[in-house]
Amino acid sequence: MRLELLGSSVEVPDGWELADTAALEPAEGDGFRASAVLSAEPLGDVDFSTWQDTADAAAPSVLTDFRLIDREHVTVDGHPGGRRVAHHLAPTGHALVMEQWVTVLDAVGWTLTLTVDAPRYDLLADPFAGIASSWRLPEAVTRP
């Protein structure tokens, strides 16, 4: 199953529910549903490092109990990028682990955000890595 945005796409597990630019794992009871979200934003003249430093600085004011766990340089579909792992609390009180993969292509900042409740992160870390490795960027960027 493929989640798509502006020519960018990732493969998500079969059975996940597609909803606009997000995919949600199947519902089981009233627990938190893991998700994959694609987003794109025009950056203008802002470079990759500034974009990511700004995101890290803003996160604590947007996400409750935000804690950056790890940030590293990676390659996203052949392009220089980054990976961030962080903790925060959902409005429901669930402790969450957020894994983000980011890159810039033609002055557009691309983000793949994978989120799961903290107790299940170990169970979904490998599937999340598979989703991230399936990420394909567009050959020609359509501005968001």
Image (spheres, helix red, strand yellow):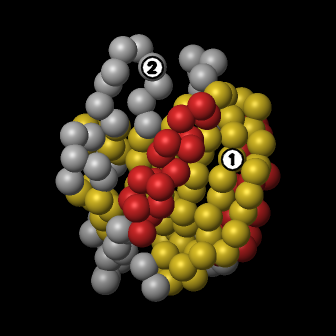
Q: Secondary structure at mark 1?
A: strand
Q: Secondary structure at mark 2?
A: loop
Mark toward the start of the polypeptide (2 vs 1): 2
Check the picture and name the quadrant holding the C terminus.
Answer: bottom left
Dot label at residue 134: none
- Report which residue position mark 2 lands on: 31
Left or right? Give the position of 122 relative to 60.
left
Q: Residue 90: where, in percent of width, then height?
A: 60, 26
Left or right? Give the position of 34 relative to 98.
left
- Report which residue position mark 1 lands on: 86
Q: Residue 84: where, in percent of width, then height?
A: 65, 58
79 versus 37 height, above or below: below
- Amino acid type for the residue under numbered disc 2: Gly
Q: Which residue does the image show at 64% across and 28% down from the upper left? A: 95
Give how far apart the Cα atoms at labels 2 and 1 are: 20 Å
Q: Which residue does the image show at 56% across and 41% down from the upper left? A: 121
- Amino acid type for the residue under numbered disc 1: Ala
Q: Nearer the viewer, residue 71 or 8?
A: 71
Q: Residue 6: where, in percent of width, then height?
A: 30, 64
72 versus 58 height, above or below: below
